[in-house]
Amino acid sequence: MSHVPHELAEEFPEFVEKMHDLKVSDAHFAKMAEEYHELNRKVHLAETNVAPREELAEVDLRKRRGALKDEIYAYLKAN
């Protein structure tokens, strides 16, 4: 598979080390990161037409990914 854009390390390069530490020490963060990863892969597959979706379903995936990204950013800033 080609490069998947919008991975967390790419989105938050200043928090790469912190994200790694939280993934192994904080179950809640690990769950959010895994959910983001899954959503991001689904969006990428839809955008590249590997696994096309109806437009509204794709938009919904992007909105969910964006909301989760905001939640992860807030969590990274607070911890």
Image (spheres, helix red, strand yellow):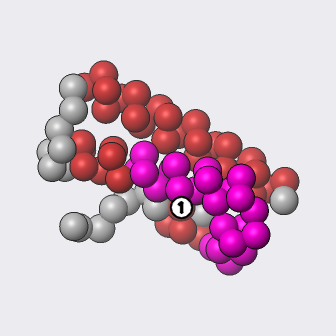
Residue depicted at 31% across the width and 32% down the height: 58
Question: Circle 1 sits in a helix, a strand or a loop, which is it?
Answer: helix
Q: Could you tell me which quadrant the N terminus lies in?
A: bottom left
The residue identified by callout 1 is 8
Q: Position of residue 57 (x, y in %)?
A: 31, 26
Q: Position of residue 45 (x, y in %)?
A: 24, 49
Residue most extreme to the front = 27
Which of the 4 image quadrants contains residue 67?
top right
Q: Position of residue 21 (x, y in %)?
A: 72, 74
Residue depicted at 61% across the width and 53% down the height: 31
The magenta stretch spans residue 23: yes
Residue depicted at 66% across the width and 67% down the height: 23
56 horizontally vs 31: left or right: left
The image shows residue 43, relative to residue 26, as above or below, that is: above
Magenta residues, as a range? Answer: 15-40
The image shows residue 24, relative to residue 47, as above or below, that is: below
Q: Residues within 10 Å of mark 1 (few under 14, many from 20)?
A: some
Residue most extreme to the top = 56
